[in-house]
Amino acid sequence: MTERVKQLAESLRGDMVSFLREIIAIPSMNGSEKNVVQRMKKEMEKIGYDRVWVDPLGNLLGQIGTGPRLIALDGHCDTVGVGNPETWEIDPFKGDYRNNIIYGRGASDQKGGLASAIYTAKILKETGIPDDISLLVTASVLEEDYEGLCWQYILKETGIKPEAVLLTEPSNLQIKTGQRGRMEMKVKTRGISCHGSAPERGENAIYKITPIIEDINRLNNKLHSPSILGKGTVVVTDVSSSAPSLCAVPDSAVLHLDRRLTEGETLESCVEEIAVLPSVKAAGAEITVPEYTVASYTGLKYPTKAYFPMWLMERSHPVVGAAERAYRNQFSHEPEVGAWGFSTNGVATKGGYDIPTIGFGPGKEEYAHTPYDQVHENDLVKALEFYAAFVLEWR
């Protein structure tokens, strides 16, 4: 079967490259995924999925097989923007193809992984999917700004619950078993406004927040962890204030914090470590975790708190074992196993709902969100082989 999977994956190389170039050429920034979803839906139907549908949030789902044990391959179809177009040497929406490399926004993060995932069904229809297995391939939305929101919706609102999820984010063809989490916090100080000509009559909220910035920087330097995920971090990413005018003393000031969470860190513990800072206590500052009401391209609004928990699979877990066996059998050498530096939909599947989750994808993490966004076609083929091998290896 190993050789059969390899042959089938190789035979699909050209089709998969052409498909990837097409979907790169369709801009699909966060919240604007409709057109690319429709194009991928057509491809699933052409391949012959048993069922293809789009849920009310706009996620595309395709299923083959009728077995009770559901495995999901997930990739997000939204991308970040282009940024300064002058930094791009190629057109980000052309799907440029040179020297066996496909370039453009989303090539690595992460339409390449989606192309391989979608074509996995083509192989399994040829080899035959195990009788007790069903495969769900999801092209999820809104991941770049609100990772996990798509799977919060799927798991809460649709009744779908896979027994394992394989994320197809770029991993340089390594098996990924976890990532740090992420949360946002706002720290607000209040003052009393007055005319800028007589600042002594008021209470300047910016002055009260300045020592808090210094304390947060010191806190970040103290954070440490022996985890494979690395240490947690906290950083001020925005400062704002309000006043009746630019000629008046500010009556409020707000810091926006980006907090990355490692093992053992939770929403509550991270809020508490800010609350006990001497400067926060002295200023009587308020700490909140924002909640966003996110609207998808379908118009559906779905709220989420800005907390995306860390997740980590034990190396001894059966899902990790199945992935390692599938890799070893398919490629005849040992896989590299590690953790991602960025955040993924695993914050919901594993971090929020404890569904066994791993990752494996074509492309390199370092190309994500850069003007050098790219993926090698050989990576697409190898990822396709692995996805099919993983499903066939499932016990």
Image (cartoon, helix red, strand yellow):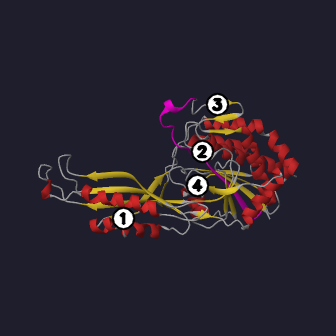
Q: Label for residue 287?
A: 1
Q: Label for residue 96?
A: 3
Question: What are the residue bounds of the magenta stretch?
Answer: 66-89
Query: In this picture, is 309 found above or below 206?
Result: below
For label 1, the SS is: strand
Chain-order first, disc 3 or disc 4: 3
Query: In this picture, is 378 found above or below 284?
Result: above
Chain-order first, disc 1 or disc 4: 1
Amino acid type of the residue that numbered disc 2 sits on in the rendered structure: Glu
Nearest the eye: 204 or 53:
204
Chain-order first, disc 4 or disc 2: 4
Amino acid type of the residue that numbered disc 4 sits on in the rendered structure: Thr
Give the number of the mark in front: 1 or 2. Answer: 2
Amino acid type of the residue that numbered disc 3 sits on in the rendered structure: Asp
Q: Are marks 3 and 1 in contact (CB under 8 Å)?
A: no
Residue under label 2: 366
Amino acid type of the residue that numbered disc 1 sits on in the rendered structure: Ile
Q: Residue at 26% x, 55% y: name it.
A: 206
Residue under label 4: 344
Residue 149 locus on image (x, y percent): 54, 57
Residue 37 visible in rendering: no
Q: Residue at 56% x, 45% y: name it.
A: 78
Residue 217 visible in rendering: yes
